[in-house]
Structures are given as structure tokens and as C-alpha cells.
């Protein structure tokens, strides 16, 4: 039952392969080099269907088979000529027709073997000539010798197995069976020709019939074996191609990985190292040697080499990552976060398979980058928690604010009203904190739209100046320089207001009381793709150790600040494809925050509008 299912599965698989190949049958040649040429029927009747000729030899296995066949023909021709000559000499015949035929055949096979070895007469190495000059000549020569003397003691009929066998291997099934049929008919005809001249003609005819049947079997079996070999060759070639593609893909992935990858053998030789690993091992990546190189090459790597050597001794790498400090060639030190894995020493855990050399694969990161990533993850978790807490605070805060407003309506003593004002100030502060936290939390994005940033900035600045008690003009602490034409950008008006108000609050807090202490300007880039909104302050320069943390959440230089203002500005800008950055200038307004917004195709002029 199981055997029949396997046979059905094999037949179904073969049918699919034949359908994919577009041919009713396959051979060794068309499996290696594509489908056989479909030639028109020959004028003399020909084979019909596929042309029974060899394809140009290209595959290595096919080349070896054909070269072996050509060499065997040459050796067989010489041996056959010597055997007939010795037999004739014993019988008293010096020259005979079989000897002449064998001599011509030996000469032809030797010449063809030389042309094949020396690659000469390439014009005669075409597919049709290859078939006729090998299989065709063998059929004619061996058939003619057997026809001349069917009852010879040398049994020339056995020689016909060679061309039939090679026809089954090197040609499609139909021409191979036709070759076997032709040889079988010739054997029967030769036996019938001498049937009356020999005493045991029935045995001779039976022998010819059995020989013809055997040739059919040889053609079928050789064809099946050639198809199986062709399938295995094609499978091996496909597997090799897939392995090559997989190796290229793995190489590309490893080369582009941010983590460093080192492949180290038991002798502490680095077999492979991607660019990230080379950058981590040396101060300058160009100074890192090209693999393979020894891990003990540099004194600063000895601590890493010792860890790898100990891991090879244990047979595994520690389950937890380890942190190491290596010394670079410029005497600086670098902290590395290292994870390791070992390749299997035996294929698929088979103890009977030959042992492979184990390799240690190290994944290296700079410890500072790992710690920064952990901080970011913690900050993201804290942000989600803070958003949930802020949402829960809103309702009781609203109730406290309402109760405080009701108390304010009553007749209160001066000390009580002072307490009410303190409560009101702190309620407003709590509300701003809750709004900041909710704004910083990820949520639904406001859709971007095209707006006139010139009008929006002018409106926001005027409203903000009234709120903080500033009078706009030439003597004002706020100087606004805007184009006198509309400038279209992609943003949201409410989010732009939030960003600009945060920047103005920070700028006015640290600016000097002189006129023009805070300056706002709006310009477009030379290529017209961006509009740059700059908010500058003439206050003390921001310390350099504070600059890297300006846009980090919960980082504030004020005791009463939340540290979310600039972080919210960056988040809002990124939601609309804009960018915000800090620039230090040497002029009066040394602290400048720039917001670059993507522009729409609107025309702006060089004129300025001073508010």
C-alpha cells in the first residue's frame, strides 16, 4: 500500500517536472542545457518529434560522460582491430572485410578523440555531427561487422549494446527506443539471412530476438537512469544557487547590521568581521586588519581573547551578556556589551557524522548605546504611565477648581482670599502639567494641512504679547521679522501655536530686558522646499553640557519645570514632517531654535514686515 503511494507520488512529481519543462520527456542533455531543439521532419522520414542529436556540450557532468564515451570508442576500436587480426591470422586470413571495417572504425574513433581532446575542427563539434560521428558510426560499424558474419565466435552483436546504451543516455526516450528497435530488426534480419546455412537456425533466431529485447531494456533503463541523474544534477544546481543567494543575503544583512558581528575559531582567529565590529575594535575603522586575523594581534584585545578562550574551554558562552572594556590603539578605552553563540559541532546532532570545527559568533554593541536604548525604553514606559495618571487626575482637578471658584464667590477675609489665589495658581500649574503630559503621550495625530505661516506667526505673536504684557513695536523686547507675502507650509495651526508659544516662553524667560531681546524671523531655503522659523534670545548661552538633553523628556533646568516643553515641540514637529533644532550663534542672539517646515508651492518675496 505504502509502496503504491510512493510510486504514485513519484509519477505525479515527474509529471509536474515534465509539464514545467514543456516537453513530454527528458534526457540528460535537455535537463542540463534546456529543451532539445525541435527540428522539422527530415526529408527522408527522419525520427519525427525531437531531433535525435546531441546539444552542444556545456555541463561539467555531461562533458565528462561524453569525453569518457569518446575515449572508450578509441580504445575499443584499437582492441577490436587487434582481436580480428589475431583471429584472422590463426585462421590463415590476413585481410578480411571485418578487419577493414574495424581499421576504418579505429581510425575514425582515434581522430575524433584527438579532435575532442585538442578542441580542433570546432565546426565538426556541432550537435548533429556529435551524434552521427559517435553513436551513428558505432551503429553502422558494429552492425555491418555483425551482418557480414552473424555466427562469428567473437559475438559482434554484444558491441551494439554500447551505441544503444549511449543513445538512451544522451538522447530523448523516443529516439533511443527507435535506435534499439532498428538494431533489433537488423539482428533478426542478419539471423534470417543465414538461417538456411546453419544447422541450428531456430536457436540463432531466438538469440537475435532475445538480444533485441535486451537492447530495448538497456535503452529504457539507461534513459530512466539518465533522467534520475539529470534530476539530481538539476536539484544540486538549484540547491547550490539557493545556497549562494542565501549566503549573499546573509552577507548583506550582516554587513548592514548596526551590531558588530565577529566569527572566531578555536585558534582565536577572526574568520569574519562586519564593518560595525571593525569600528568598535579600533579607533579608526581603516586601521582594522582584514579577516582572517588573530584576536591577540592587539594588546587591547587580550581581555576579549581570554573570554573567548575560556568559552571554548567550557563549550558554551554565558547565557547573560557580558560587559568588557578594551583599550584602543590611541590609549582610549571603550566599553563593549557582548553576546555570544556557538555553532553546532555536529550536523543536526548526529553523533555518527564527522565533527565540524565549532565557531564562536559574537554580537558586539557599545555599552553606551545599549544604556541609551534602555533609557529610551524606560522613558517610553514612563510616558505611557504618566499619560494614564494625568488622565485620572483631570476629573478630581476639575472638581477642585470648581470648588475653589465657588469659594471665591463668597465674602472672605483678606487672608482667606490670599489662600484662594494660592490654590488658583497651583490648580492652573497642575492643569498645565496635565496638558503637557497628555500632549507628549502618543495618541491620535492631528491631520496636517496647508496654512499661511506668515499670518499664523503674526497672529500668535500678537496674542502672546498681549498675554505676557508686551507692547509690540520698535522698542519692544519682541522683534518679529516676517515676509510681506504669504508663505505656505504643511502643519497644523493649533500645534504651531503650541510650538511657538513654548519657544517664546523659554526665550523671554532668559532674554535680557533690552529692546529686541527676543527675535523671531521667517525665511525660506534657497531651493524653496522648506520654511525656517527662528526664535532667538540674547540671554546667556546655553551650557554645552545641557545641549544634548534639550529635547529629552523630563529634563529641566528649572525646579518648577516639567521638562516636557521642548520635547513636546519636537514631537509635534515630527508629526507633520517638520524638524526642530538648536543652533548656537556668535552674534547677539546666541541661542536660536529653528523650526523647519515643509513648504507648499507659494511665492515669497524678500521684503520684511516688522511688528
Image (cartoon, helix red, strand yellow):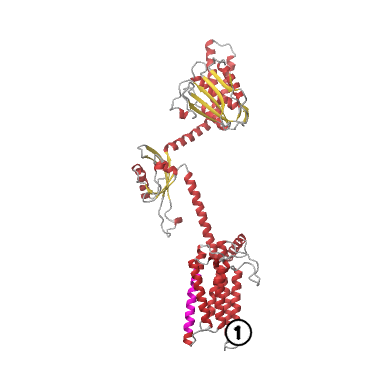
Quadrant of residue 149 in the image? bottom right
Please tell me how many numbered marks the rendered image carries: 1
Q: Quadrant of the C terminus?
A: top right
x, y percent for residue 534: 54, 25
In this rendering, would 547 be left or right of 310?
A: right
Q: Nearer the viewer, residue 163 or 413?
A: 163
x, y percent for residue 506: 51, 22
Is residue 75 located in the magenta-colored stretch of the structure?
yes
x, y percent for residue 263: 42, 48
Which residue carries the number 1 mark?
Answer: 193
Relative to 166, say whether 323 is above or below: above
Relative to 96, say whether 107 is above or below: above
Q: Which residues are magenta?
A: 67-87
Quadrant of residue 157 in the image? bottom right
Q: Nearer the viewer, residue 208 or 330?
A: 330
Q: Residue at x 56, y 21 (%)?
A: 481
- For label 1, the crowd category at 10 Å Cα-Cα, with few meaning under 14, some 14 to 19 and many 20 or more, is few
Query: What main secondary structure does the magenta stretch of the protein show?
Result: helix
x, y percent for residue 294: 36, 48
Q: Residue at x 53, y 60 (%)?
A: 235
Q: Quadrant of the N terminus?
A: bottom right
Question: Can you see residue 429?
Answer: no
Q: Residue at x 47, y 46 (%)?
A: 254
In this rendering, would 371 be left or right of 464?
A: left
Relative to 94, say whether 113 is above or below: above
Question: Can you see residue 84?
Answer: yes
Quadrant of residue 363 in the image? top left
In this rendering, would 299 be left or right of 434?
A: left
Is residue 16 located in the magenta-colored stretch of the structure?
no
Q: Nearer the viewer, residue 569 or 342?
A: 569
Per the image, label 1 sits on a secondary structure element best described as helix
Amino acid at each position: 500500500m505504502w509502496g503504491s503511494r510512493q510510486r504514485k507520488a513519484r509519477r505525479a512529481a515527474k509529471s509536474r517536472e515534465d509539464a514545467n519543462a514543456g516537453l513530454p520527456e527528458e534526457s540528460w542533455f535537455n535537463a542540463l542545457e534546456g529543451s532539445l531543439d525541435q527540428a522539422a521532419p527530415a526529408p527522408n522520414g527522419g525520427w519525427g518529434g525531437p531531433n535525435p542529436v546531441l546539444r552542444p556540450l556545456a555541463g561539467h557532468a555531461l562533458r565528462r560522460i561524453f569525453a569518457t564515451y569518446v575515449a572508450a570508442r578509441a580504445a575499443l576500436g584499437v582492441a577490436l582491430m587487434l582481436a580480428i587480426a589475431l583471429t584472422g591470422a590463426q585462421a590463415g586470413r590476413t585481410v578480411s572485410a571485418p578487419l577493414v571495417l574495424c581499421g576504418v572504425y579505429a581510425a575514425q574513433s582515434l581522430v575524433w578523440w584527438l579532435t575532442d581532446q585538442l578542441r580542433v575542427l570546432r565546426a565538426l563539434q556541432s550537435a548533429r555531427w556529435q551524434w552521427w560521428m559517435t553513436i551513428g558510426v558505432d551503429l553502422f560499424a558494429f552492425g555491418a561487422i555483425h551482418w557480414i558474419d552473424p555466427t562469428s565466435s567473437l559475438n559482434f552483436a554484444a558491441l551494439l549494446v554500447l551505441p544503444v546504451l549511449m543513445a538512451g543516455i544522451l538522447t530523448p526516450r523516443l529516439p533511443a527506443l527507435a535506435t534499439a528497435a532498428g538494431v533489433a530488426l537488423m539482428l533478426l534480419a542478419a539471423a534470417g539471412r543465414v538461417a538456411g546455412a546453419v544447422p541450428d537456425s531456430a536457436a540463432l533466431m531466438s538469440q537475435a530476438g532475445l538480444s533485441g529485447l535486451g537492447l530495448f531494456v538497456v535503452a529504457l533503463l539507461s534513459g530512466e537512469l539518465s533522467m534520475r541523474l539529470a534530476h539530481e544534477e538539476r536539484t544540486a544546481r538549484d540547491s547550490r544557487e539557493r545556497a549562494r543567494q542565501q549566503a549573499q543575503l546573509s552577507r548583506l544583512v550582516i554587513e548592514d547590521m548596526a551590531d558588530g558581528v565577529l566569527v572566531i575559531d578555536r585558534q582565536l582567529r577572526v574568520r569574519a568581521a562586519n564593518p560595525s565590529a571593525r569600528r568598535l575594535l579600533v579607533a579608526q575603522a581603516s586601521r582594522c586588519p582584514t579577516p582572517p586575523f588573530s584576536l591577540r594581534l592587539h594588546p587591547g584585545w587580550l581581555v576579549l581573547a581570554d573570554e573567548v578562550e575560556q568559552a571554548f574551554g567550557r563549550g558554551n558562552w554565558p547565557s547573560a551578556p557580558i560587559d568588557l572594556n578594551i583599550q584602543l590603539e590611541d590609549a582610549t578605552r571603550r566599553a563593549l556589551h557582548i553576546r555570544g553563540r556557538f555553532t553546532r559541532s555536529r550536523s543536526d546532532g548526529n553523533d555518527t557524522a564527522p565533527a565540524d570545527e565549532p565557531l564562536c559568533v559574537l554580537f558586539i554593541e557599545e555599552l553606551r548605546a545599549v544604556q541609551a536604548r534602555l533609557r529610551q525604553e524606560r522613558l517610553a514606559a514612563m510616558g505611557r504611565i504618566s499619560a494614564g495618571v494625568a488622565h485620572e487626575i483631570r476629573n478630581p482637578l476639575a472638581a477642585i477648581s470648581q470648588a475653589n471658584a465657588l469659594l471665591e464667590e463668597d465674602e472672605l477675609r483678606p487672608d482667606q482670599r490670599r489662600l484662594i489665589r494660592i490654590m488658583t495658581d497651583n490648580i492652573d500649574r497642575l492643569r498645565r502639567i496635565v496638558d503637557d503630559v497628555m500632549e507628549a503621550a502618543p495618541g491620535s495625530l492631528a491631520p496636517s494641512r496647508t496654512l499661511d505661516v506668515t499670518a499664523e506667526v503674526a497672529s500668535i505673536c500678537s496674542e502672546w504679547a498681549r498675554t505676557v504684557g508686551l507692547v509690540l513695536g520698535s522698542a519692544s523686547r519682541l522683534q518679529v521679522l516676517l515676509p510681506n507675502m504669504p508663505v505656505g507650509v504643511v502643519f497644523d495651526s493649533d500645534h504651531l501655536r503650541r510650538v511657538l508659544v513654548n519657544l517664546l516662553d523659554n526665550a523671554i524667560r532668559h532674554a535680557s530686558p533690552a529692546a529686541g531681546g527676543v527675535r523671531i524671523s521667517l525665511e525660506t531655503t534657497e531651493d524653496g522646499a522648506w520654511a525656517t522659523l527662528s526664535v532667538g534670545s540674547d540671554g546667556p548661552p546655553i551650557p554645552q553640557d545641557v545641549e544634548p538633553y534639550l529635547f529629552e523628556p523630563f529634563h529641566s533646568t528649572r525646579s518648577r519645570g516639567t521638562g516636557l516643553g521642548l520635547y513636546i515641540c519636537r514631537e509635534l514637529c515630527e508629526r507633520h514632517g517638520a524638524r526642530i533644532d538648536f543652533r548656537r550663534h556668535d552674534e547677539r542672539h546666541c541661542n536660536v531654535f529653528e523650526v523647519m517646515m515643509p513648504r507648499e508651492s507659494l511665492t515669497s518675496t524678500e521684503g520684511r514686515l516688522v511688528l
